[in-house]
Amino acid sequence: MNRLLVFGVFFLLIACSSNIEKDIVGEWGGTIAQQDLVFYSDGRVDMKGHSHGVYQGVYKIENSNELTCTFPRLSKPVKSTAKISGDNLTLIFPSGRKESYLKK
């Protein structure tokens, strides 16, 4: 394959990829899950359930898209893989379940 073509494909992949750590900051409304998520730049997260109030916790992102949210009110951390495309956030859990959110 021609070097220019390889460089162009590589550049396109980088340009289209999301920086999860930066792009996740903000408020997201659940499209399936009856909850909203707010990620703050300082590592805090709020989970606002439509029927269970607000859970406050912290989050971290490892390996570019592995999201771990820890809430003191829950017995264990919530782990998922985060994918952002435009204004859409998809969380994929180890069980295979997916949750979708729209940026507010």
Image (tube, rainbow, N blue to C red):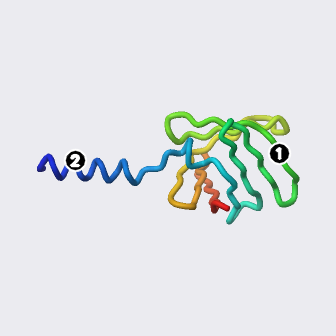
> Which of the two residues, 58 or 76, is positioned nearer the viewer here?
58
Place of residue 61 in the rendered image (x, y in percent of width and height, measured from the top left): 58, 37
Q: Residue at x 50, y 39 (%)?
A: 64
Place of residue 35 in the rendered image (x, y in percent of width and height, measured from the top left): 76, 58
Label 2 Cα crowd, 10 Å radius (few <14 / some 14-19 / many 20+): few
* Amino acid found under the numbered disc labelled 2: Phe
Image quadrant holding the C terminus, namely: bottom right
- Mark 1 — residue? 55
> Which of the two residues, 29 or 68, is positioned nearer the viewer here?
29
In this image, 83 relative to 25: left or right? left
Place of residue 45 in the rendered image (x, y in percent of width and height, measured from the top left): 73, 43
> Which of the two residues, 19 or 80, is positioned nearer the viewer here?
19
Q: Which residue is drawn at 81% across and 55% down?
A: 49
Label 1 Cα crowd, 10 Å radius (few <14 / some 14-19 / many 20+): some
Q: Which of marks 2 and 1 is nearer the N terminus?
A: 2
Q: What element carries label 1?
A: strand
Q: Residue at x 83, y 45 (%)?
A: 55
* Amino acid found under the numbered disc labelled 1: Tyr
Q: Is mark 2 on a helix, strand or loop?
A: helix
Q: Residue at x 30, y 49 (%)?
A: 11
